[in-house]
Structure formats: C-alpha cells, structure tokens
Image (cartoon, coloured by chain):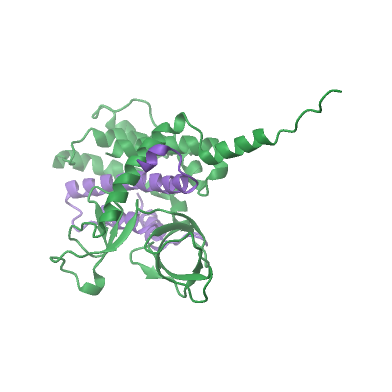
Chain colours: A green, B purple
Amino acid sequence: MIGKWMAMLSALIKFYKGNPGLLQTLELLDFYKSPSGIEMRKCHQQFTPLKNVSNSVPQTNGAFLRFFNEYRNTYAHPLRVEPEEAAEAVPYLESAMEELLIELYFLGSYRLGYLENVTQPAGGNNYKGTILNLTGEQPRTIRGSQLVGTQSHEGEIYLSKHAASYDPICSLHPLLVYDRCTEPTCRVRPQRKIAFFNGLTRQGWLNYNVSCRHTLTNQSDSYNLRLAIAGAQAAVVSLSTSVHPSVAGRQAKRVRYVPRRPESS
Amino acid sequence: MLDYLDEALDDMVLRGVGSAAAQPFPYPLVELYNKAYHPDDMNDMVSRFHGLIDLAEAIIKYLTVMLLGQYLHTGRPDAGVDK
C-alpha cells in the first residue's frame, strides 16, 4: 500500500516541478530536492547489506523517502519484526527520522482547519463559519466566526496557511475526514468522543484520546474516500503522459490569441 | 541525538516553537510523533520500531495528500476520477 502512495508522491512532485506556478506549498518541492542529512545516509548504509534494498545512497530527502519505501516493503504486511532486529534498527531510524522532521519544519506553516457551523447571517453570499484548528495535540476552535465563500463546504477539512483570516488553499475531503466516534464500546466520555480519520495510516483512524477502532459513520464519506484514492491513482498514473487541464487551457488560449499575419495584398 | 536537540524537535512538532509563522504540526503527525518518540515503554523495541515506521508512512501519505488536494482542486485532471 505504501508503494502506491510513494508512486503518487513522486509523480506529483515531478508534475509540480514542471508547473511550480500551480503549487501553493512550494516548500514541499524544496524539501524533496534538498540534500539528505548524515543520519539519513547512515540509516541507508546500515540497512543495505541486511535488507536487499537499492545500493545507491540517497542524496536527497526525496530519495530517502523512496529508500524508506523499499525498506518498509522488505517487511511483511501486517508489519512483523523480531525484537533483535527492531533493537538494531531503532537507533538508526530514530536519528534519520529526527533529521527528516527538521527538514519538514514548513508543515507548521499550514493549518488543517475543519469547517463547521456555516451560517448565512446577512443573506446573499455572506456566509460565516467556525474553524476547528486540527494542528497540535488537541483540536482548538479559532476565536470568532470567519467569512467563508460559497466554495467552502461545512464538514470538510481544509488546508490553509496559518493566518488570522480564513483563506483556504484547498479541501482535503474525503482524503482527510473529521468525525465523532460512535462506537458503543468507546470508553471515553461522550464530550471527548472525537476521532480524527486520516484514512492513510496503518490503523485507519487516529483518535484524540480514543483508542477504539472507529468506522466511518457517513457511508458516503467511506465511498468517496475509496473513490478519491482510486481516482487519484488513475489520475496520477496519467500525469507523465497528459497535460493538466489548467495548463492545457492556458496553452489553448495562447494558441487562440496568436495574432494573424497580415494578409499580403 | 543530544537532549537539547530532542527538546527542540518537541518544540517544533508539538508546540510550533521556532519561527514567527510556525504552529504545531498537523494532528495526525503529532499523534504518531508522540507514539514514536514518547512511547509508554522505552524498552519495548518492537513497539518503537512500529511507531517509527508508522510515522514515516504517515509523512509520505500526508505529503501526498497535500499535493493531491491541490492537484484535484485546480481541476479534474482525468475522466477516470469520476469513474
């Protein structure tokens, strides 16, 4: 499974390298091509003779992620490891991951915001909503309601820059979904029954202080998630051979507005 | 790694300390970071190994989602998306 995500990431990076004007999180491109750190290289060198992964030492952060993908795939699904093997690997992985996290410092500049309670107090397009900030260890409501456009949908998670005003980059729905835990066996008090789904982890759900296994209560979200992932894979596979519609549109306009040559008399 | 670097990493990931614009990391990564770097039992190497693998996998997936969200937002790139 991780291999599919890695393939999508590589294809998207390749696409945005050629079209940086379409990307709002440009730091991600810089991160991917920046040289990998000493600990990351040590980690690779340590595991190469033990695990049959590629021999070239990763020179960039992106290459380290690809190495990690190969390394992960040398283990079974679900992940099984012997205690001795884990004891040997942990110090190397820990140091390499610390370096990787430092390189990912820019993630702190982008907010995951869950849009809730959208109302239309003055009619027209004057929509207001409450944003739940999903960064850090606990969800926090951002003070005061924010003006939201008609393009924003209640109940979806948006990626935005950290700023006082609501200015989303894009919706991450249904790749990321925020929902409440409805498991009857959930031991946490009702008011804290809050689960955060990212659909992308081995566990499926990540919970705020909840350890139960949660299932999506909204069937359409579950369906949309599968649809989005399948569709995204199909779309990304075609990245190398097709042109993005917004780019294609600009190219078409360019062609359309080429001035005609004056006709010779 | 030295202790003060561990603390600096905690500050950056969990509390968003380090630059004026910085905030904590997104919740999924914070949660997995805590499991990987602050496990209940430091001597349980298998759990720590699992925690680190989970964190690295989530990083790959989260970065993909960041790009994928923007990619799909700017237009449906392929008819296959609707199928």
In the image, A151: left or right of A228? right
Q: Residue furthest right?
A: A265
Query: Residue A76's quadrant in the figure?
Result: top left
Question: Residue at coordinates 66% horizontally, 35% vertically from top-left?
Answer: A256
Please count the marks in the image. Answer: 0
Q: Position of residue A115 (x, y in %)?
A: 41, 65
Q: Residue furthest front?
A: A265
Question: Residue at coordinates 24% horizontally, 57% vertically from top-left?
Answer: A216
Q: Position of residue A257 (x, y in %)?
A: 69, 36
Question: Residue at coordinates 28% horizontally, 34% vertically from top-left?
Answer: A71
Q: Position of residue A120 (x, y in %)?
A: 47, 73
User: In the image shown, does A194 or A77 lie closer to the viewer?
Assistant: A194
Question: Residue at coordinates 39% horizontally, 59% vertically from top-left?
Answer: A157
In the image, B41: left or right of A5? left
Query: Residue A251's quadrant in the figure?
Result: top right
Residue A75: tell me if it is visible: yes
User: In the image shown, does B8 or A32 lie closer to the viewer?
Assistant: A32
User: In the image shown, does B74 or A71 lie closer to the viewer?
Assistant: B74
Q: Is residue A207 above or below residue A144?
A: above
Q: Position of residue B68 (x, y in %)?
A: 42, 45
Residue A39: tell me if it is visible: no
In the image, A93: left or right of B9? left
Q: Which quadrant of the figure contains the C terminus of chain B?
A: top left
